[in-house]
Amino acid sequence: MTNTEIVMKLIGNVKPIGETNYDKAAKNNLIELCQLIEDLTSKVFDVAIDCRGYQEHSIKMCQEYAKTFLLNQANNVKEYLQDEQH
């Protein structure tokens, strides 16, 4: 099992289907998933921010990976928001 599969098994379904009781549980699961993503993203921010300016190659690699990840996520959100406006 992948990490994502394990997490989703623990959290449960997050996608609503149009049935009230199911969708209430899905929303609660979605809230839990979003909180987890926020916490994990914070860890990535820590690497991106705290490791700026280091000269050690291994630290630079991690900082650059974290920065690229965050930039890609920001671009994905930007694209989604632009699509929502149309």
Image (cartoon, helix red, strand yellow):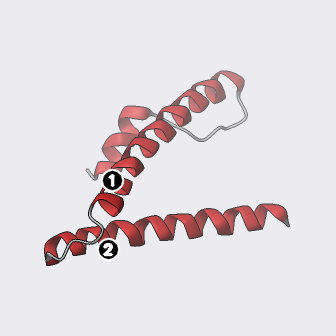
The label on residue 29 is none
Q: Quadrant of residue 61?
A: bottom left
- At 34% from the left and 65% from the top, the residue drawn is 66
Q: Quadrant of residue 69?
A: bottom left
Compared to residue 71, the image places residue 2 above or below, namely: above
Give residue 36's position: percent from left, percent from top.
42, 39
Compared to residue 73, the image places residue 44 above or below, namely: above
Q: Secondary structure at mark 1?
A: helix
> Given the image, on which type of amino acid does mark 1 rest?
Asp
> Given the image, on which type of amino acid does mark 2 rest?
Glu
- At 46% from the left and 44% from the top, the residue drawn is 38
Q: Nearer the viewer, residue 67 or 49?
A: 49
Name the side, left or right, on which 16 lies relative to 13.
right
- At 67% from the left and 69% from the top, the residue drawn is 79
Give residue 40's position: percent from left, percent from top.
37, 47
The label on residue 46 is 1
Q: Secondary structure at mark 2?
A: helix
How many marks do you count on the picture?
2
Name the side, left or right, on which 3 lies relative to 16.
left
Q: Which residue is mark 2?
A: 64
Compared to residue 19, the image places residue 76 above or below, namely: below
Name the side, left or right, on which 76 lies relative to 58.
right
Give residue 20's position: percent from left, percent from top.
71, 24
Q: Nearer the viewer, residue 38 or 2?
A: 38
Q: CA distance from mark 1 to mark 2?
A: 12 Å
Q: Quadrant of residue 75?
A: bottom right
Q: Residues within 10 Å of mark 2 (few under 14, many from 20)?
A: some
Mark 1 or mark 2, which has the lower sequence index? 1
Q: Nearer the viewer, residue 48 or 16?
A: 48
- The furthest residue to the right: 86
Name the side, left or right, on which 63 lies relative to 28.
left
